[in-house]
Amino acid sequence: MAERDLTRLDADAGTRQNLWTKQFASKRRAPGAPRRCGTEWYTRLVYRFGTPSVTLDARSSTAARACSLSAETAPTPRRPPPASMLRLDRVTLREIRLTLKEPFRISSGVESERRIMLIELTDANGAHTWAECVAFPRPNYTPETIDTAFLAIREWLAPRLFGKPLPGAYVVHDILARDIRGHNMAKAVLEMGCWGLQAEIERRSLSALLGGTRTRVPTGISLGIQPEPRLLVERAVAAVAAGYRKVKLKIQPGQDLEYVRAVRAALGPEVEIMADANAAYTIDDADHLRRLDDCDLLMLEQPFGADALLQLAELQKRLRTPLCLDESIIDVSRARDMIALDCGRIINIKPGRVAGFSASKAIHDICQAANIPVWCGGMLESGIGRAYNVALASLPNFSMPGDLSPSARYWARDIVIPEWTMDEDGLVHVPHDKPGLGVAIDTDFIESLTVRKEELRGTGSAMSVA
Ligand code: OSB
Ligand code: MG
Protein backbone atom coordinates (compact mmCIF):
# COMPACT_ATOMS: atom_id res chain seq x y z
CA MET A 1 0.00 0.00 0.00
CA ALA A 2 1.35 3.41 -0.95
CA GLU A 3 2.57 5.50 1.95
CA ARG A 4 0.39 8.30 0.65
CA ASP A 5 -2.68 6.18 1.33
CA LEU A 6 -1.76 6.04 4.98
CA THR A 7 -1.38 9.72 5.54
CA ARG A 8 -3.71 12.58 6.05
CA LEU A 9 -2.49 16.11 6.26
CA ASP A 10 -4.38 18.00 8.85
CA ALA A 11 -3.54 21.50 7.77
CA ASP A 12 -4.85 23.21 10.84
CA ALA A 13 -4.62 21.17 14.01
CA GLY A 14 -2.17 18.59 12.80
CA THR A 15 0.69 20.92 12.12
CA ARG A 16 0.35 23.31 15.00
CA GLN A 17 2.90 21.68 17.23
CA ASN A 18 5.35 21.43 14.35
CA LEU A 19 4.94 25.12 13.73
CA TRP A 20 5.95 25.82 17.26
CA THR A 21 9.02 23.75 17.11
CA LYS A 22 10.00 25.30 13.79
CA GLN A 23 9.51 28.66 15.38
CA PHE A 24 11.85 27.63 18.14
CA ALA A 25 14.36 26.31 15.66
CA SER A 26 14.56 29.58 13.79
CA LYS A 27 15.35 31.51 16.97
CA ARG A 28 18.33 29.71 18.32
CA ARG A 29 19.84 30.92 21.52
CA ALA A 30 23.61 31.26 21.48
CA PRO A 31 25.32 28.96 23.99
CA GLY A 32 25.47 30.69 27.35
CA ALA A 33 23.21 33.57 26.26
CA PRO A 34 20.29 34.31 28.57
CA ARG A 35 16.94 32.95 27.60
CA ARG A 36 14.77 35.64 26.06
CA CYS A 37 11.16 35.77 25.18
CA GLY A 38 10.32 37.92 22.22
CA THR A 39 7.62 36.51 20.01
CA GLU A 40 4.24 38.08 20.49
CA TRP A 41 2.51 34.77 21.06
CA TYR A 42 4.94 33.61 23.63
CA THR A 43 4.02 33.83 27.28
CA ARG A 44 6.59 33.72 29.98
CA LEU A 45 5.52 31.40 32.71
CA VAL A 46 6.49 31.58 36.29
CA TYR A 47 5.88 28.70 38.60
CA ARG A 48 6.71 28.59 42.25
CA PHE A 49 8.11 25.39 43.59
CA GLY A 50 8.38 26.73 47.13
CA THR A 51 11.38 29.04 47.54
CA PRO A 52 13.16 30.31 45.59
CA SER A 53 10.80 30.69 42.65
CA VAL A 54 11.79 28.97 39.46
CA THR A 55 11.15 30.43 36.03
CA LEU A 56 10.24 27.99 33.34
CA ASP A 57 10.61 29.17 29.84
CA ALA A 58 8.73 27.27 27.17
CA ARG A 59 11.61 27.84 24.80
CA SER A 60 13.86 25.94 27.12
CA SER A 61 11.68 22.89 26.62
CA THR A 62 13.29 19.73 25.46
CA ALA A 63 11.46 20.01 22.19
CA ALA A 64 12.89 23.43 21.55
CA ARG A 65 16.42 22.40 22.37
CA ALA A 66 16.17 19.30 20.23
CA CYS A 67 14.88 21.16 17.26
CA SER A 68 17.61 23.73 17.44
CA LEU A 69 19.80 20.92 16.13
CA SER A 70 17.99 21.01 12.83
CA ALA A 71 17.80 24.61 11.85
CA GLU A 72 17.09 24.05 8.17
CA THR A 73 13.41 24.74 8.63
CA ALA A 74 11.44 27.16 6.51
CA PRO A 75 9.98 30.31 8.06
CA THR A 76 6.46 29.56 9.14
CA PRO A 77 3.48 31.74 9.96
CA ARG A 78 3.09 32.54 13.61
CA ARG A 79 0.15 31.14 15.44
CA PRO A 80 -1.08 31.63 18.95
CA PRO A 81 -0.74 28.78 21.40
CA PRO A 82 -3.98 27.01 22.32
CA ALA A 83 -6.07 29.05 24.69
CA SER A 84 -6.81 26.13 26.99
CA MET A 85 -5.63 26.11 30.53
CA LEU A 86 -5.10 22.99 32.56
CA ARG A 87 -5.27 23.08 36.30
CA LEU A 88 -4.78 19.67 37.81
CA ASP A 89 -6.92 19.10 40.86
CA ARG A 90 -6.74 15.39 41.58
CA VAL A 91 -4.80 12.32 40.53
CA THR A 92 -6.02 8.86 41.41
CA LEU A 93 -3.44 6.10 41.20
CA ARG A 94 -4.43 2.48 41.05
CA GLU A 95 -2.96 -0.89 40.30
CA ILE A 96 -4.86 -3.45 38.28
CA ARG A 97 -3.82 -6.97 37.34
CA LEU A 98 -4.48 -8.33 33.88
CA THR A 99 -3.47 -11.85 32.92
CA LEU A 100 -1.70 -12.21 29.58
CA LYS A 101 -3.16 -14.88 27.29
CA GLU A 102 0.35 -16.26 26.99
CA PRO A 103 3.47 -15.49 29.09
CA PHE A 104 5.83 -13.07 27.32
CA ARG A 105 9.53 -13.89 27.70
CA ILE A 106 12.40 -11.51 26.95
CA SER A 107 16.08 -12.14 27.68
CA SER A 108 15.81 -10.67 31.20
CA GLY A 109 12.57 -12.16 32.44
CA VAL A 110 9.00 -13.23 31.81
CA GLU A 111 5.65 -11.49 32.29
CA SER A 112 2.55 -13.61 32.89
CA GLU A 113 0.26 -11.37 34.83
CA ARG A 114 0.64 -7.71 33.97
CA ARG A 115 0.61 -5.46 37.05
CA ILE A 116 -0.47 -2.14 35.55
CA MET A 117 -0.66 1.29 37.12
CA LEU A 118 -3.51 3.39 35.78
CA ILE A 119 -4.06 6.99 36.74
CA GLU A 120 -7.08 9.25 36.50
CA LEU A 121 -6.45 12.96 36.15
CA THR A 122 -9.11 15.48 37.03
CA ASP A 123 -8.98 19.13 36.11
CA ALA A 124 -10.26 21.93 38.37
CA ASN A 125 -13.14 22.37 35.89
CA GLY A 126 -14.05 18.70 36.12
CA ALA A 127 -12.45 17.48 32.89
CA HIS A 128 -11.16 13.97 33.36
CA THR A 129 -9.03 11.35 31.63
CA TRP A 130 -7.06 8.17 32.15
CA ALA A 131 -3.43 7.28 31.50
CA GLU A 132 -1.21 4.22 31.96
CA CYS A 133 2.23 3.81 33.51
CA VAL A 134 4.26 1.22 31.63
CA ALA A 135 6.68 0.24 34.42
CA PHE A 136 7.06 -3.49 35.04
CA PRO A 137 7.04 -5.18 38.46
CA ARG A 138 10.79 -5.81 38.40
CA PRO A 139 13.68 -3.60 37.22
CA ASN A 140 14.67 -5.97 34.41
CA TYR A 141 13.92 -3.69 31.46
CA THR A 142 14.88 -0.33 32.97
CA PRO A 143 15.60 0.50 36.64
CA GLU A 144 12.02 1.61 37.31
CA THR A 145 9.25 -0.56 38.70
CA ILE A 146 5.55 -0.05 39.28
CA ASP A 147 6.28 0.45 42.99
CA THR A 148 8.97 3.08 42.43
CA ALA A 149 6.49 4.84 40.13
CA PHE A 150 3.84 4.96 42.89
CA LEU A 151 6.43 6.46 45.22
CA ALA A 152 7.78 9.01 42.73
CA ILE A 153 4.35 10.21 41.65
CA ARG A 154 3.01 10.50 45.17
CA GLU A 155 6.07 12.06 46.81
CA TRP A 156 7.66 14.25 44.15
CA LEU A 157 5.91 14.49 40.83
CA ALA A 158 2.15 14.98 41.22
CA PRO A 159 2.55 17.67 43.93
CA ARG A 160 4.41 19.82 41.40
CA LEU A 161 1.40 19.97 39.12
CA PHE A 162 -1.48 20.48 41.51
CA GLY A 163 -3.33 23.78 41.39
CA LYS A 164 -1.03 25.45 38.88
CA PRO A 165 -2.53 27.05 35.81
CA LEU A 166 -0.76 25.40 32.87
CA PRO A 167 -1.05 26.88 29.36
CA GLY A 168 -0.87 23.38 27.91
CA ALA A 169 0.57 19.93 28.37
CA TYR A 170 3.73 21.01 26.57
CA VAL A 171 5.05 22.67 29.75
CA VAL A 172 4.73 19.58 31.93
CA HIS A 173 7.91 17.84 30.80
CA ASP A 174 10.18 20.58 32.06
CA ILE A 175 8.26 21.02 35.31
CA LEU A 176 8.74 17.35 36.13
CA ALA A 177 12.32 17.21 34.86
CA ARG A 178 13.71 19.95 37.04
CA ASP A 179 16.06 18.46 39.66
CA ILE A 180 14.36 15.08 39.58
CA ARG A 181 16.58 12.54 37.84
CA GLY A 182 15.22 9.44 36.20
CA HIS A 183 11.77 8.03 36.99
CA ASN A 184 10.84 8.58 33.36
CA MET A 185 7.90 6.19 33.36
CA ALA A 186 6.43 7.87 36.43
CA LYS A 187 6.92 11.28 34.80
CA ALA A 188 5.50 10.02 31.52
CA VAL A 189 2.18 8.83 32.87
CA LEU A 190 1.51 12.28 34.35
CA GLU A 191 2.82 14.15 31.34
CA MET A 192 0.92 12.04 28.82
CA GLY A 193 -2.17 12.23 31.01
CA CYS A 194 -1.96 16.02 30.74
CA TRP A 195 -1.90 15.73 26.92
CA GLY A 196 -4.91 13.44 27.18
CA LEU A 197 -6.64 15.93 29.44
CA GLN A 198 -5.89 18.82 27.08
CA ALA A 199 -7.29 16.85 24.15
CA GLU A 200 -10.40 16.18 26.23
CA ILE A 201 -10.79 19.86 27.15
CA GLU A 202 -10.28 21.04 23.57
CA ARG A 203 -12.55 18.26 22.26
CA ARG A 204 -9.85 17.23 19.80
CA SER A 205 -8.35 13.84 19.20
CA LEU A 206 -5.07 13.15 20.95
CA SER A 207 -3.56 12.45 17.53
CA ALA A 208 -4.56 15.89 16.21
CA LEU A 209 -3.26 17.57 19.36
CA LEU A 210 0.15 15.91 18.90
CA GLY A 211 0.37 16.80 15.23
CA GLY A 212 -0.46 13.34 13.89
CA THR A 213 -0.95 13.02 10.14
CA ARG A 214 -1.76 9.33 9.65
CA THR A 215 -5.27 7.94 9.91
CA ARG A 216 -4.00 4.34 9.99
CA VAL A 217 -0.75 3.05 11.38
CA PRO A 218 1.04 -0.13 10.32
CA THR A 219 1.51 -2.74 13.02
CA GLY A 220 4.17 -5.27 13.83
CA ILE A 221 4.16 -8.09 16.37
CA SER A 222 6.75 -8.79 19.02
CA LEU A 223 7.13 -12.51 19.70
CA GLY A 224 8.58 -13.63 23.02
CA ILE A 225 11.35 -16.21 23.35
CA GLN A 226 9.99 -19.74 22.83
CA PRO A 227 11.33 -23.05 24.14
CA GLU A 228 12.10 -24.21 20.60
CA PRO A 229 12.34 -22.74 17.07
CA ARG A 230 9.30 -24.67 15.82
CA LEU A 231 7.02 -22.83 18.29
CA LEU A 232 8.41 -19.49 17.21
CA VAL A 233 7.93 -20.34 13.54
CA GLU A 234 4.29 -21.30 14.20
CA ARG A 235 3.63 -17.92 15.81
CA ALA A 236 5.47 -15.99 13.12
CA VAL A 237 3.54 -17.71 10.32
CA ALA A 238 0.23 -17.02 12.08
CA ALA A 239 1.21 -13.37 12.60
CA VAL A 240 1.92 -12.81 8.91
CA ALA A 241 -1.37 -14.53 8.00
CA ALA A 242 -3.16 -12.15 10.38
CA GLY A 243 -1.75 -9.18 8.48
CA TYR A 244 1.14 -8.01 10.67
CA ARG A 245 3.61 -5.88 8.71
CA LYS A 246 6.71 -6.73 10.73
CA VAL A 247 7.73 -9.66 12.92
CA LYS A 248 10.05 -9.02 15.85
CA LEU A 249 11.75 -11.99 17.46
CA LYS A 250 13.10 -11.81 20.98
CA ILE A 251 16.52 -13.41 21.22
CA GLN A 252 19.13 -14.20 23.86
CA PRO A 253 22.47 -16.02 23.87
CA GLY A 254 21.81 -19.66 23.04
CA GLN A 255 18.44 -18.87 21.46
CA ASP A 256 19.25 -16.63 18.55
CA LEU A 257 20.67 -17.65 15.14
CA GLU A 258 18.89 -20.95 14.92
CA TYR A 259 15.55 -19.32 15.76
CA VAL A 260 15.95 -16.36 13.43
CA ARG A 261 17.09 -18.59 10.55
CA ALA A 262 14.13 -20.90 11.03
CA VAL A 263 11.70 -17.99 10.88
CA ARG A 264 13.40 -16.48 7.83
CA ALA A 265 13.25 -19.83 6.05
CA ALA A 266 9.55 -20.22 6.87
CA LEU A 267 8.48 -16.69 5.96
CA GLY A 268 10.58 -16.22 2.83
CA PRO A 269 12.65 -13.21 1.84
CA GLU A 270 9.89 -10.58 1.58
CA VAL A 271 8.64 -10.38 5.15
CA GLU A 272 10.18 -7.75 7.42
CA ILE A 273 11.81 -9.57 10.31
CA MET A 274 13.86 -8.09 13.13
CA ALA A 275 15.42 -9.32 16.37
CA ASP A 276 15.45 -7.74 19.83
CA ALA A 277 18.01 -8.84 22.42
CA ASN A 278 17.01 -6.52 25.29
CA ALA A 279 20.66 -5.90 26.15
CA ALA A 280 21.64 -9.57 26.50
CA TYR A 281 25.00 -9.47 24.65
CA THR A 282 28.38 -7.78 24.97
CA ILE A 283 31.01 -6.69 22.48
CA ASP A 284 32.61 -10.12 22.94
CA ASP A 285 29.64 -11.50 20.99
CA ALA A 286 30.28 -9.26 17.96
CA ASP A 287 31.51 -12.06 15.69
CA HIS A 288 28.56 -14.21 16.62
CA LEU A 289 26.07 -11.38 16.03
CA ARG A 290 27.61 -10.69 12.63
CA ARG A 291 26.21 -13.98 11.47
CA LEU A 292 22.75 -12.45 11.75
CA ASP A 293 23.61 -10.35 8.69
CA ASP A 294 22.80 -13.38 6.54
CA CYS A 295 19.22 -13.39 7.82
CA ASP A 296 18.54 -10.04 6.18
CA LEU A 297 16.99 -8.46 9.23
CA LEU A 298 15.27 -5.10 9.06
CA MET A 299 17.17 -4.23 12.23
CA LEU A 300 18.75 -5.64 15.39
CA GLU A 301 17.36 -3.96 18.50
CA GLN A 302 19.42 -3.22 21.60
CA PRO A 303 22.03 -5.98 21.51
CA PHE A 304 24.10 -4.41 24.34
CA GLY A 305 23.34 -2.62 27.60
CA ALA A 306 21.71 0.78 27.61
CA ASP A 307 24.94 2.68 28.36
CA ALA A 308 27.25 0.81 25.98
CA LEU A 309 27.08 3.42 23.22
CA LEU A 310 30.71 3.11 22.16
CA GLN A 311 30.53 -0.66 21.98
CA LEU A 312 27.31 -0.38 19.99
CA ALA A 313 29.13 1.96 17.59
CA GLU A 314 31.88 -0.62 17.23
CA LEU A 315 29.31 -3.34 16.51
CA GLN A 316 27.49 -1.16 13.97
CA LYS A 317 30.77 -0.72 12.09
CA ARG A 318 31.07 -4.47 11.79
CA LEU A 319 27.43 -5.23 10.96
CA ARG A 320 25.46 -4.66 7.77
CA THR A 321 22.19 -4.95 9.72
CA PRO A 322 21.12 -1.57 11.12
CA LEU A 323 21.04 -1.34 14.90
CA CYS A 324 17.92 0.04 16.55
CA LEU A 325 18.10 1.45 20.06
CA ASP A 326 15.40 1.01 22.67
CA GLU A 327 16.68 0.95 26.30
CA SER A 328 19.54 3.35 25.45
CA ILE A 329 17.27 6.19 24.36
CA ILE A 330 16.03 7.74 27.57
CA ASP A 331 15.89 11.34 26.37
CA VAL A 332 16.62 13.69 23.48
CA SER A 333 20.26 13.95 24.45
CA ARG A 334 20.79 10.19 24.03
CA ALA A 335 19.10 10.32 20.64
CA ARG A 336 21.56 13.02 19.60
CA ASP A 337 24.45 10.92 20.91
CA MET A 338 23.23 7.94 18.90
CA ILE A 339 23.18 9.97 15.72
CA ALA A 340 26.57 11.53 16.40
CA LEU A 341 28.22 8.21 17.26
CA ASP A 342 26.40 6.17 14.60
CA CYS A 343 25.75 3.54 17.27
CA GLY A 344 22.21 3.05 15.99
CA ARG A 345 20.35 3.91 12.80
CA ILE A 346 16.74 3.50 13.91
CA ILE A 347 14.97 4.41 17.17
CA ASN A 348 12.21 2.55 18.94
CA ILE A 349 10.34 5.36 20.69
CA LYS A 350 8.40 4.34 23.78
CA PRO A 351 6.94 7.45 25.33
CA GLY A 352 7.09 5.94 28.82
CA ARG A 353 10.85 5.40 28.54
CA VAL A 354 11.57 9.03 27.54
CA ALA A 355 9.29 10.72 30.12
CA GLY A 356 6.37 11.36 27.80
CA PHE A 357 5.16 12.98 24.63
CA SER A 358 7.21 16.19 24.55
CA ALA A 359 10.45 14.21 24.49
CA SER A 360 8.96 11.64 22.10
CA LYS A 361 7.99 14.40 19.68
CA ALA A 362 11.38 16.04 20.00
CA ILE A 363 13.16 12.75 19.30
CA HIS A 364 10.82 12.18 16.39
CA ASP A 365 11.71 15.62 15.01
CA ILE A 366 15.48 15.34 15.29
CA CYS A 367 15.37 11.86 13.76
CA GLN A 368 13.25 13.14 10.90
CA ALA A 369 15.80 15.88 10.24
CA ALA A 370 18.63 13.31 10.36
CA ASN A 371 16.84 10.76 8.16
CA ILE A 372 16.57 8.27 10.99
CA PRO A 373 13.34 6.24 10.92
CA VAL A 374 11.45 5.77 14.17
CA TRP A 375 8.71 3.40 15.23
CA CYS A 376 6.57 3.09 18.31
CA GLY A 377 7.52 0.37 20.77
CA GLY A 378 5.18 -1.42 23.14
CA MET A 379 5.23 -2.40 26.81
CA LEU A 380 2.41 -4.93 26.83
CA GLU A 381 0.03 -2.04 27.48
CA SER A 382 -3.66 -2.24 28.15
CA GLY A 383 -6.03 -0.41 25.80
CA ILE A 384 -5.42 2.86 27.66
CA GLY A 385 -1.69 2.87 27.01
CA ARG A 386 -2.41 1.73 23.48
CA ALA A 387 -4.55 4.84 22.84
CA TYR A 388 -1.55 7.03 23.64
CA ASN A 389 0.84 4.94 21.51
CA VAL A 390 -1.47 4.91 18.50
CA ALA A 391 -1.82 8.70 18.70
CA LEU A 392 1.97 9.08 18.84
CA ALA A 393 2.51 6.63 15.99
CA SER A 394 0.31 8.82 13.77
CA LEU A 395 3.16 11.36 13.54
CA PRO A 396 4.77 11.45 10.09
CA ASN A 397 8.24 10.03 10.85
CA PHE A 398 6.84 6.88 12.49
CA SER A 399 7.61 5.26 9.18
CA MET A 400 8.06 1.68 10.35
CA PRO A 401 5.41 -0.62 11.85
CA GLY A 402 5.02 -0.19 15.61
CA ASP A 403 4.55 -2.82 18.32
CA LEU A 404 0.85 -1.97 18.44
CA SER A 405 -0.82 -5.36 18.53
CA PRO A 406 -4.60 -5.39 18.97
CA SER A 407 -6.17 -6.00 22.40
CA ALA A 408 -7.10 -9.61 21.68
CA ARG A 409 -3.47 -10.53 21.20
CA TYR A 410 -2.76 -9.92 24.89
CA TRP A 411 -6.02 -10.08 26.86
CA ALA A 412 -9.19 -12.13 27.12
CA ARG A 413 -10.91 -8.79 27.70
CA ASP A 414 -9.42 -5.30 27.46
CA ILE A 415 -10.39 -2.33 29.64
CA VAL A 416 -11.47 -0.07 26.75
CA ILE A 417 -14.52 -0.03 24.47
CA PRO A 418 -14.19 -0.71 21.64
CA GLU A 419 -11.12 -2.88 22.00
CA TRP A 420 -8.16 -2.11 19.72
CA THR A 421 -8.22 -4.05 16.49
CA MET A 422 -6.08 -4.37 13.38
CA ASP A 423 -7.45 -4.79 9.87
CA GLU A 424 -6.31 -7.54 7.49
CA ASP A 425 -3.68 -5.20 6.05
CA GLY A 426 -2.07 -4.89 9.49
CA LEU A 427 -3.29 -1.36 10.08
CA VAL A 428 -4.66 0.10 13.29
CA HIS A 429 -7.14 2.89 12.70
CA VAL A 430 -6.36 6.14 14.49
CA PRO A 431 -9.55 7.47 16.11
CA HIS A 432 -8.83 10.96 14.79
CA ASP A 433 -12.52 11.83 14.55
CA LYS A 434 -13.15 11.25 18.27
CA PRO A 435 -12.10 13.62 21.04
CA GLY A 436 -9.53 12.64 23.66
CA LEU A 437 -8.28 9.06 23.73
CA GLY A 438 -10.87 7.92 21.18
CA VAL A 439 -12.03 4.92 23.23
CA ALA A 440 -14.40 4.60 26.19
CA ILE A 441 -13.01 3.32 29.47
CA ASP A 442 -14.64 0.25 31.00
CA THR A 443 -14.63 1.63 34.55
CA ASP A 444 -16.68 -1.19 36.08
CA PHE A 445 -14.25 -3.75 34.76
CA ILE A 446 -11.29 -1.67 35.95
CA GLU A 447 -12.83 -1.42 39.40
CA SER A 448 -13.16 -5.20 39.54
CA LEU A 449 -9.47 -5.61 38.62
CA THR A 450 -8.20 -3.02 41.11
CA VAL A 451 -5.95 -4.25 43.90
CA ARG A 452 -4.72 -0.87 45.17
CA LYS A 453 -5.94 2.71 44.89
CA GLU A 454 -4.67 6.06 46.17
CA GLU A 455 -6.12 9.50 45.69
CA LEU A 456 -3.75 12.47 45.54
CA ARG A 457 -4.90 16.05 45.91
CA GLY A 458 -3.30 19.45 45.97
CA THR A 459 -2.91 19.43 49.73
CA GLY A 460 0.05 17.13 49.21
CA SER A 461 -1.18 14.40 51.51
CA ALA A 462 -1.91 11.02 50.03
CA MET A 463 -5.13 9.36 51.02
CA SER A 464 -5.18 5.62 50.79
CA VAL A 465 -8.56 4.40 49.64
CA ALA A 466 -8.12 0.67 49.10
O1 OSB B 1 11.98 -4.44 24.23
O2 OSB B 1 10.23 -3.79 23.22
C1 OSB B 1 10.78 -4.40 24.14
C2 OSB B 1 8.06 -6.21 26.11
C3 OSB B 1 8.60 -6.16 27.37
C4 OSB B 1 9.83 -5.56 27.55
C5 OSB B 1 10.51 -5.03 26.49
C6 OSB B 1 9.97 -5.06 25.22
C7 OSB B 1 8.73 -5.69 25.02
C8 OSB B 1 8.09 -5.83 23.74
C9 OSB B 1 6.58 -5.86 23.76
O3 OSB B 1 8.68 -6.02 22.71
C10 OSB B 1 5.93 -5.33 22.56
C11 OSB B 1 4.43 -5.23 22.76
O4 OSB B 1 3.98 -4.48 23.64
O5 OSB B 1 3.71 -5.91 22.03
MG1 MG C 1 13.10 -3.57 22.73
Image (cartoon, rainbow, N blue to C red):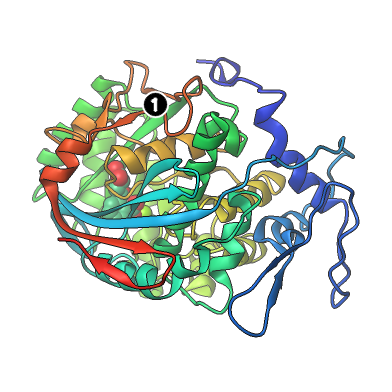
Above or below — where is 298 with respect to 344? above
- Residue kind at label 1, given as amino acid type: Glu
Mark 1, residue position = 270
SS at circle 1: loop
Q: Is residue 19 visible?
A: yes
Quarter containing the C terminus: bottom left
Find residue 444 and report its horizontal and vertical position in percent. 16, 36
Find residue 274 and report its horizontal and vertical position in percent. 37, 44
Q: Residue at x 67, y 51 (%)?
A: 366
Give the left or right position of residue 445, taking residue 156 as reference.
Answer: left
Taking the image in four quarters, ligand 2 sits in the one at bottom left
Residue furthest bottom in the image: 51
Above or below — where is 163 with respect to 4? below
Q: Residue at x 52, y 71 (%)?
A: 309
Find residue 289 and report its horizontal and vertical position in percent. 36, 60
Find residue 237 and report its horizontal and vertical position in percent. 21, 28
Q: Residue at x 35, y 70 (%)?
A: 154
